[in-house]
Image (cartoon, grey):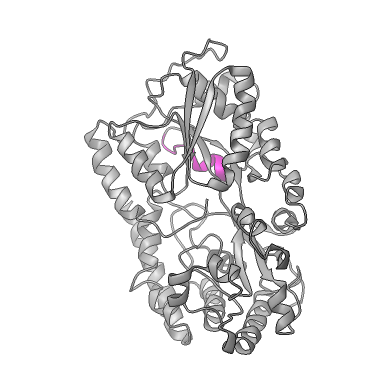
């Protein structure tokens, strides 16, 4: 689920042409070939289903869950791990007439495009016949994401959800004699600690903080919401990034960048590599990445704290609306042309059932897409306390990762010249960041108007 900088802008435009050329239409009722009624007890007609994912860290756990389904279904499951970029290239090629997997992940960046072009199986008749799936039991934002707005059809069932926390290196904090972060920390505390470590660690090439601005969900988005701004408004029709609150959040982002690793360094090395190399004392990261740090060479030095908050009212306490964590969620979807829709749906149903969701949490794959099934996740990593991710939603607030019909259009533009690029690469001037917020307001408003 990590949001790498992708070529999705090109993908979206290419798909709009290629999928229309192969018979898709944004006005069609996708999944219209699906029968109005289904028999979930019908005998399966395939011996194996293929599943595509993009995260190797989840492979073992998901295969264990799939194997449990195989025990009762008799249908084998082959899970293929495809790199993020190749995943969408192969899926697009399959949508144009090549081979597609039977079951696969959907993501917020691309879901709208696939739902509108007869690529995904209409799951509604299957869900209606399935006593184990009630969409009211899942995170509303994820359910809504995979529901086509013009016809209300569901094309994926929530697989998981994620939250964000602060990761820090205790060894570096000890070395430079700075107190560890804790759950009382504000973003100002992060800034002050980062400034101290960057200054003290200058000779060692150590930075107090590292942020990859292209990874918006696990980074700067959260700060904007903490200060009262919204990247995309709740109705998906605008933004408040250029408001006083939005600018206050981005000013905090600017300050953090001014004492952290330069974006030129981050672009070459990456925040995760900087952190694991002992060259960055703090990063924010998503729950989907825990295993990478849990299995790292120096994992004993690593610890998690709740994502910091913004003390907007200055009362020294974290009040409602001051500690936000973005959350996102993948959806399990099926190929509309799968040879056995019953089998494909049955596998999805098991992945998303209470039993499958609990196994996913217990095995440390990811937190659940079903509400109330993630508690076991906090205990899945022996010796590392990851409860900050659970407490982020229990003691803070969640906002769903901002999206519109063509998210990648404005996301990509924000990272270019005329967007935030100059402010991110030269973070010493508050006026440059303020102007960038004004530019971003127009970029997003114009992109939404063109959708």
Q: Is residue 419 above or below residue 343?
A: below
Query: In this rendering, is residue 17 above or below 386?
Result: above
Question: What residue is rendered at 63% in x and 39% in y?
Answer: 61
Position of residue 243 measured from the top left corner of the image (x, y, whole percent): 49, 72
Viewer-proximal residue among 87 and 277? 277
Is 62 on the left-hand or right-hand side of 364? left
The region drawn magenta spans 141-150
Residue 284 horizontal side relative to residue 334, left or right = right
User: Image height check: is 180 above or below 326?
Assistant: below
Q: Is residue 395 left or right of residue 274?
A: right
Residue 26 shows in this picture: no
Q: Residue at x 74, y 50 (%)?
A: 378
Place of residue 299 in the rendered image (x, y in percent of width and height, measured from the top left): 69, 63
147 to 283, vertically: above or below: above
- Give the number of callouts: 0
Residue 128, given in percent of the width and then of the height, sits at: 56, 21
Check residue 142 for magenta coloring: yes
């Amino acid at each position: 689920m990590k949001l790498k900088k992708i070529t999705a802008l090109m993908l979206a435009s290419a798909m709009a042409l290629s999928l229309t050329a192969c018979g898709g239409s944004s006005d069609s009722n996708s999944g219209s070939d699906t029968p109005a009624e289904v028999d979930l007890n019908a005998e399966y007609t395939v011996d194996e289903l293929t599943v595509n994912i993009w995260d190797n860290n989840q492979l073992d756990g998901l295969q264990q869950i799939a194997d449990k389904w195989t025990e009762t279904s008799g249908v084998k499951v082959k899970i293929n791990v495809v790199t993020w970029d190749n995943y969408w290239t192969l899926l697009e090629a399959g949508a144009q007439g090549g081979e597609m997997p039977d079951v696969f992940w959907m993501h917020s960046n691309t879901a709208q495009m696939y739902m509108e072009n007869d690529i995904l199986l209409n799951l509604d008749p299957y869900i209606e016949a399935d006593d184990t799936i009630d969409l009211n039991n899942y995170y509303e934002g994820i359910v809504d994401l995979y529901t086509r707005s013009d016809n209300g059809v569901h094309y994926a069932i929530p697989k998981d959800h994620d939250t964000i926390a602060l990761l820090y290196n205790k060894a570096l904090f000890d070395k430079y004699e700075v107190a560890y972060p804790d759950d009382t920390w504000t973003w100002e505390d992060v800034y002050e600690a980062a400034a101290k470590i960057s200054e003290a660690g200058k000779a060692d090439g150590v930075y107090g903080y590292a942020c990859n601005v292209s990874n918006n969900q696990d980074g700067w988005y959260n700060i904007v919401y903490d200060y009262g701004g919204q990247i995309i408004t709740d109705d998906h029709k605008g933004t408040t990034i250029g408001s006083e609150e939005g600018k206050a959040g981005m000013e905090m982002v600017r300050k953090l960048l001014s004492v952290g690793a330069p974006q030129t360094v981050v672009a070459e090395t990456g925040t995760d590599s900087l952190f694991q190399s002992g060259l960055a004392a703090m990063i924010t990261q998503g729950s989907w990445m825990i295993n990478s740090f849990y299995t790292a060479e120096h994992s004993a030095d690593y610890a998690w704290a709740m994502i910091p908050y913004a003390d907007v009212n200055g009362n020294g306490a974290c009040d409602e609306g001051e500690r936000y964590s973005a959350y996102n969620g993948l959806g399990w979807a099926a190929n509309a042309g799968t040879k056995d829709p019953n089998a494909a749906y049955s596998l999805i149903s098991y992945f998303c059932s209470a039993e499958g969701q609990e196994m996913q949490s217990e095995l440390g794959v990811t937190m659940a897409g079903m509400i109330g099934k993630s508690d076991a996740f906090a205990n899945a990593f022996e010796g590392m306390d990851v409860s900050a991710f659970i407490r982020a939603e229990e003691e803070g607030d969640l906002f769903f990762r901002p999206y519109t019909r063509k998210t990648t259009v404005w996301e990509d533009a924000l990272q270019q010249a005329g967007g935030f690029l100059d402010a991110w690469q030269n973070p010493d001037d508050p006026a440059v960041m303020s102007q960038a917020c004004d530019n971003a307001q127009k970029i997003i408003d114009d992109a939404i108007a063109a959708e």
